[in-house]
């Protein structure tokens, strides 16, 4: 039983699943057909029940009529207790296939005659003059008193089977029911096929419009309204939603277009700012170069003036005058031995030779210094040209060499402002960087440190530059000073474009330096404990993995004390 119930439940669930996924047209047709079938079935059941009730009553009436006829015909035989005549009359019931048994009972409780199934009467039934018909299942038990002049000489009992009659009626009803179901189903199918379009048609049109909008992204489409019913109301709501979506989509497209234009403008401005900051950084580098070149040119000018002064004061012209004096003497031997001037001439020539030799050595030393200064100028200019040529290219370089180049470009300014530069280089791998960008960043950091030191009155102005390995894959270059420091509220703003704390600052240096560091895959960060506590700027750049640890490490031969405020 449980297995059958489980199978029925599974089948019902499967049918519901199929119905749930079926098209709405098929659902409507199925609903109409099932409704018609249910209505016909209900009507048929009612009609079958009525026919059963009527058939039972008719069957009972027919048996009662038959019983009255038999009782009337057997009155004499029963009165005279003529069993043979009574049996002959009773045997006529055999022709009726519904009768399965009959008997005539005398008042004393004995059966006068009978055939088929014997039915025993109760005492009350033997004495009763009432006619009774009682169904027990499909079997009818009918009692018909035999009456003569008010007396009751006997009772007729007939047992009849209602089954054959019921089966014949059921077969007939089944044929009629199947015919009605078939004709009604066909008629319902034709009618539903016509009528369901009034319901499923608008819904299918609405679904088609929704699918087209979703596929083509065309929010200008609208669904057609067929009738002012619930589907029509749904169509109105759908069209209203399309209006809103179209309006928002149009506004969103305009907003996206505006954003794209704004991003293009920002990108353009960003490129312009990068170009400006690059030019500013190059200008700072060029300014450092000019400062250094100018300082060397001062030495060149001094050397040139000294050489000019020595040439003007040189006694080399006296050699020509002595030669002219000697050519004018006819007796050169007599002049050298007898004439006082001639006798003094050898000693004068010896002294003149010594002085000319001293002048030569001094001029030679000045010329060597002049050549060295000119060579220094050439190195500075060549270094700037080298950085300008390789701009934009990533190279594997030693961090110490990059730092030294930046220091040399600003050496004259450090000397002029009394700044001591200390190097503390740890062995670190080569770095993968754009040489020009690193020079621009370091030059800006060194100049900012110098400006910060200019504003303090301390006896010792120190800039400490150090290198170390930072985390995995990076080298950190730290530039620390014991200058004015940075206020806490400015630490988050110093890298913003245009922000500066100097009166003559432009706010490009640190911003462009941070961008350049980011473009190289690194970072530029700042730290300070506050005003008067100095500052540390750290440039982090990636390691060149294809090279080993750089062997070029430079450490200041005289270690300086740790910076009091920025170490």
Image (cartoon, rainbow, N blue to C red):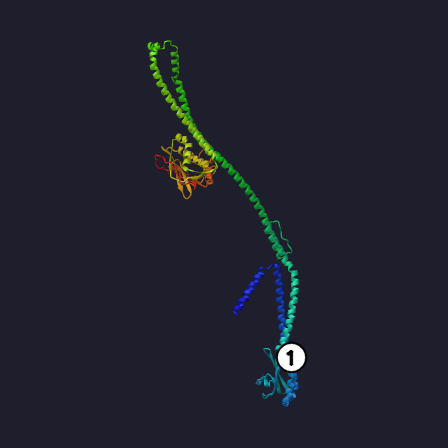
Q: Position of residue 7 (x, y in %)?
A: 54, 66
Across the whole image, how many numbered discs are drawn on residues?
1
Residue 349 or residue 494, whichever sits in front: 349
Residue 373 in view of the camera: yes
Residue 94 or residue 127, whichever sits in front: 94
Q: Where is residue 374 in the image (x, y as percent from the top left)?
A: 42, 27
Q: Position of residue 41 (x, y in %)?
A: 62, 68
Q: Which residue is drawn at 64% across and 59% down?
A: 197
Residue 145 or residue 86, whichever sits in front: 86
Q: Which residue is drawn at 37% across and 20% down?
A: 359
Residue 241, relative to residue 94: is it above or below?
above
Circle 1 — which element? helix
Q: Where is residue 527 in the image (x, y as percent from the top left)?
A: 41, 40
Name the residue furthest bottom: 80
- Tell me the quadrant of the picture where the C terminus can be found: top left
Q: Residue at x 39, y 13 (%)?
A: 323
Residue assigned mark 1: 61
Mark 1 Cα shell of 10 Å, populated few (<14), some (14-19), many (≥20): few
Residue 542 in view of the camera: no
Residue 440, relative to residue 6: is it above or below?
above
Rendering quarter of residue 25: bottom right
Q: Which residue is drawn at 61% across and 60% down?
A: 26
Name the side, left or right, on which 287 lies relative to 144.
left
């Amino acid at each position: 039983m449980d297995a059958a119930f489980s199978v029925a439940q599974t089948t019902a669930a499967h049918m519901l699943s199929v119905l749930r996924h079926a098209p709405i047209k098929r659902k409507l047709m199925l609903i109409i057909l099932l409704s018609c079938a249910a209505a016909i079935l209900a009507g048929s059941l009612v009609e079958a029940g009525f026919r059963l009730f009527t058939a039972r009553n008719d069957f009972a009436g027919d048996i009662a009529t038959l019983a009255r006829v038999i009782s009337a015909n057997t009155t004499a035989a029963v009165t005279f207790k003529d069993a043979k005549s009574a049996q002959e009359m009773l045997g006529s019931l055999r022709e009726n296939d519904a009768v399965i048994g009959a008997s005539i009972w005398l008042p004393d409780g004995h059966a006068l005659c009978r055939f088929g199934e014997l039915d025993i009467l109760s005492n009350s039934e033997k004495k009763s003059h009432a006619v009774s018909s009682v169904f027990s299942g499909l079997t009818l038990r009918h009692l018909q008193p035999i009456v003569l002049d008010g007396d009751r000489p006997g009772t007729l009992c007939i047992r009849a089977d209602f089954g054959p009659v019921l089966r014949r009626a059921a077969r007939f009803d089944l044929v009629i029911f199947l015919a009605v179901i078939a004709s009604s189903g066909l008629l319902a199918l034709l009618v539903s096929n016509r009528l369901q379009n009034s319901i499923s048609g608008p819904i299918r049109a609405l679904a088609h419009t929704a699918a087209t909008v979703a596929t083509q992204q065309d929010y200008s489409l609208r669904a057609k309204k067929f009738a002012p019913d619930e589907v029509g109301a749904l169509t109105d709501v759908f069209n209203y939603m399309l209006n809103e979506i179209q309006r928002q989509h149009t506004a969103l497209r305009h907003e996206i277009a505006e954003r794209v234009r704004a991003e293009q403008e920002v990108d353009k401005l960003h490129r312009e700012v990068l170009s400006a900051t690059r030019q500013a950084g190059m200008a700072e580098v060029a300014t450092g170069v000019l400062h250094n070149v100018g300082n060397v040119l001062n030495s060149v000018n001094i050397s040139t003036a000294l050489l000019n002064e020595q040439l003007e004061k040189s006694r080399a012209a006296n050699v020509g005058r002595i030669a002219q004096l000697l050519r004018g003497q006819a007796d050169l031997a007599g002049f050298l031995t007898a004439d006082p001037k001639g006798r003094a001439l050898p000693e004068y020539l010896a002294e003149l030779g010594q002085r000319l030799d001293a002048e030569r050595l001094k001029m030679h030393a000045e010329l060597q210094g002049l050549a060295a200064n000119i060579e220094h100028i050439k190195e500075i200019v060549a270094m700037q040209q080298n950085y300008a040529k390789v701009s934009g290219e990533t190279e594997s370089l030693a961090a110490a060499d990059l730092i030294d180049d930046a220091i040399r470009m600003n050496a004259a300014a450090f000397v002029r402002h009394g700044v001591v530069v200390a190097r503390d280089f740890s062995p670190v791998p080569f770095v993968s960087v754009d040489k020009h960008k690193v020079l621009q960043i370091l030059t800006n950091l060194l100049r900012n440190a110098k400006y910060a030191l200019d504003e303090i009155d301390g006896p010792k102005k120190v800039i400490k530059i150090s290198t170390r390995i930072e985390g995995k894959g990076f080298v950190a270059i730290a530039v620390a000073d014991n200058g004015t420091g940075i206020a806490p509220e400015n630490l988050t703003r110093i890298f913003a474009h245009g922000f500066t704390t100097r009166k003559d600052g432009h706010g490009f240096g640190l911003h462009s330096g941070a961008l350049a560091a980011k473009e190289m895959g690194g970072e530029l960060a700042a730290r300070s404990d506050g005003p008067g506590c100095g500052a540390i700027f750290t440039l982090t750049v990636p390691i060149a993995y294809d090279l080993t640890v750089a062997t070029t490490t430079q450490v200041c031969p005289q270690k300086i004390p740790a910076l009091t405020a920025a170490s």
